[in-house]
Amino acid sequence: MVTAAFQGDLGKPRPAIIIHADEFIVDHVTLLLCPLTTFLADSPAFRPTIKPSGTNGLNAVSQIMVDKITHLRKSAISQVIGHLDDDEMQILEAAAITITGLRQTVMPIMRTR
């Protein structure tokens, strides 16, 4: 969980979740993120609700806008505020699978080096 300034939000930082795989973060200039919102919608399949906790750094009940996955330059990320627990990560993963239509399958990563 981080705060980041997304385009269209007048540069106002908002909570977000980095969904970029850890092993690719260092080598990329931009990262994939899901912004969060406190404007709650009745769309649990792709807008999972997260309650504030001691580990996630949220101040209010929020929804992960999985339908708004975007990339941002690392310079737009201002600070780490926390992290999701395992159950919240599973909910985020299910929502990402739902919104993209991808099936949850394990495929070997092909490396060309």
Image (cartoon, rainbow, N blue to C red):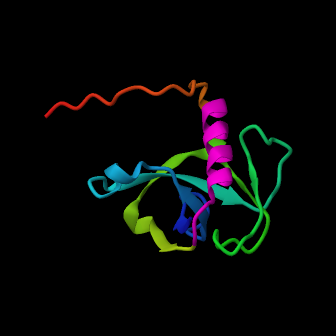
Residue 26, image quadrant: bottom left
Examine the structure image and report whether residue 36 is included in the region drawn in magenta: no
Q: Residue furthest left?
A: 113
- Seen from the viewer's position, the closer of residues 88 and 4 is 88
Q: Which stretch is magenta?
A: 82-99
**Is the C terminus in the top left, top right, bottom left or bottom right quadrant?**
top left
Which residue does the image show at 54% across and 60% down from the upper left? 6
Q: Is residue 39 left or right of residue 65?
A: right
Examine the structure image and report whether residue 90 is included in the region drawn in magenta: yes
Q: Is residue 51 left or right of residue 83?
A: right
- Point out residue 84 in the picture as x, y percentages from the top left corner: 61, 60
Q: Is residue 108 left or right of residue 27?
A: right
Which residue does the image show at 44% across and 49% down from the upper left? 20
Q: Is residue 27 left or right of residue 87?
A: left
- Point out residue 7 in the picture as x, y percentages from the top left corner: 54, 58
Which residue does the image show at 74% across and 75% down from the upper left? 59
Whether residue 59 is situated above or below residue 105 in the rendered picture: below
